[in-house]
Image (cartoon, grey):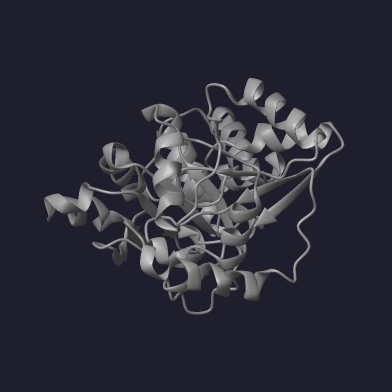
Amino acid sequence: MSASTPSLLAAVREAAAHQHYPQGALYMVATPIGNLADMGLRALQVLALADTVACEDTRHTAGLLQGYGLHKPLLALHEHNEAEAAQTVVQRLSEGQRVAYVSDAGTPGVSDPGARLVAAVTAAGLRCVPIPGASSITALLSVAGHSGWDGRFVFQGFLSPKAGERQREVLHIQADARACVLLEAPHRIEALAKDLAALGERTVTVGRELTKQFEEVAQMNAAAFPAWLQANAHRTRGEFVLLVHPAPATSGDDTGVDAATLRTLDLLLAELPLKTAVRLCAEISGQSKNALYDAALERRKASKGNGDGD
C-alpha cells in the first residue's frame, strides 16, 4: 500500500480538489464498513486536509489513516464524552480549523456517535459538511430483490436489548406493511431471530459481515430465520443488517382496517380484554380507535358464530 500511496493521493487530489473545503467546518466523514477499498475519494481528500480528526476510537482510526498513508492529530469523541469533546471541536472550528469526524465504521451520527456533536456545532452557528460513503443499509437493499417494492422503508436500527420491549417493537413492525431495516450485533442476533419468527411468512433478507471476507446474504421467511442461524455456528458471528420485506398485499375487512393491523388486533384480542386490545392496537398501528373497536366487535362476533366464544 505504501509504495502506491503517492500516486493514490495524487489521483485523489485530481478527482476531488475541485470541491470547496471551507475552513472552520466540521466534516462528517463516512468510512468503510469492513473493506478498506470502499473509502471515497472525497473522504480521503477531507482527511488529508483536516487539521484534526475527531474519532470514536483513536487506536482504530490511527490504523485506518495509516492504511492510506495519512497521519493526523486525533481527538477522542465517543458516546461517553461526546458532550464535553464537542465543545473542544467547537473551539477548534472557531479558530478556523477543519475538523473531520469519523466513527469506527460507516456513517457517523446514524447508529454511532456524532449526533450530539453536530447539534453543538450547529448551535454555535458553524457549518457541518456530510461526506458520504459505504453503507450496509443501501448495500443490502440493492441485493434484496423484492418484486414490486416501491423503495420505501422504515429504518429501525437496533431494537431494544430488553426482551419485552423488543417484542413490542416487533409487533409494531408486524403492523406496518412497509419494509423495515434492522441492525444487530452478534451476541443478540439469536434473540432477535426468535422474536422476528413471529412474523411468519414475511420475507427477511439477512446481510452478515457485508463488504468483508466472509460476507453472506441470505433470504428466507421470518419463521425460518432461527433455524438458518442454528444450521451453522459461523452464522452468529459478525455484524448484521436485515431487511424485513413489505407485508404481502392483502385486503382488510369492511371496517377499512388493513390486514396487517388486523393480525396485530387478533394477537391482542387473544390475550387481553377487548378495550385494552383496541387501545394498544391503536397505539401500535396509529389507526383510529373507533375503526379498530368496530373491527374487534366484528371479529368477536364471527368467532362466537364459529363456536369459538369466550
Residue 299 visible in the snapshot: no
Question: Which quadrant would the C terminus be assigned to in this image?
Answer: top left
- The residue lying at 87 percent from left, 37 percent from top is 125
Vertical order, 115 against 42 (above or below): above
Asked whether, in this view, residue 280 is left or right of residue 166, the answer is: right
Asked whether, in this view, residue 73 is left or right of residue 205, the answer is: right
Task: Report the number of numbered marks.
Answer: 0
Vertical order, 235 against 58 (above or below): below
Vertical order, 178 against 266 (above or below): below
Q: Relative to the observer, which residue lies in front, 39 or 70?
A: 70
Q: Relative to the observer, which residue lies in front, 273 or 170?
A: 170
Give how far across and how far down residue 23 sits, in percent: 79, 48
Asked whether, in this view, residue 233 is left or right of residue 103, the answer is: left
Quarter of the figure with residue 46: bottom right
Residue 71 visible in the snapshot: yes
- Residue reaching furthest right? 125
Give how far across and how far down residue 56 sits, in percent: 50, 35
- Residue reaching furthest bottom? 147
Vertical order, 224 against 266 (above or below): below
Q: Relative to the observer, which residue lies in front, 281 or 270?
A: 281
- The residue lying at 34 percent from left, 49 percent from top is 239
- The residue lying at 59 percent from left, 53 percent from top is 47
Give how far across and how far down residue 149 sits, in percent: 54, 74
Question: Which quadrant would the N terminus be assigned to in this image?
Answer: bottom left
- The residue lying at 23 percent from left, 61 percent from top is 214
Give how far across and how far down residue 262 sits, in percent: 53, 51
Q: Relative to the observer, which residue lies in front, 307 or 267?
A: 267
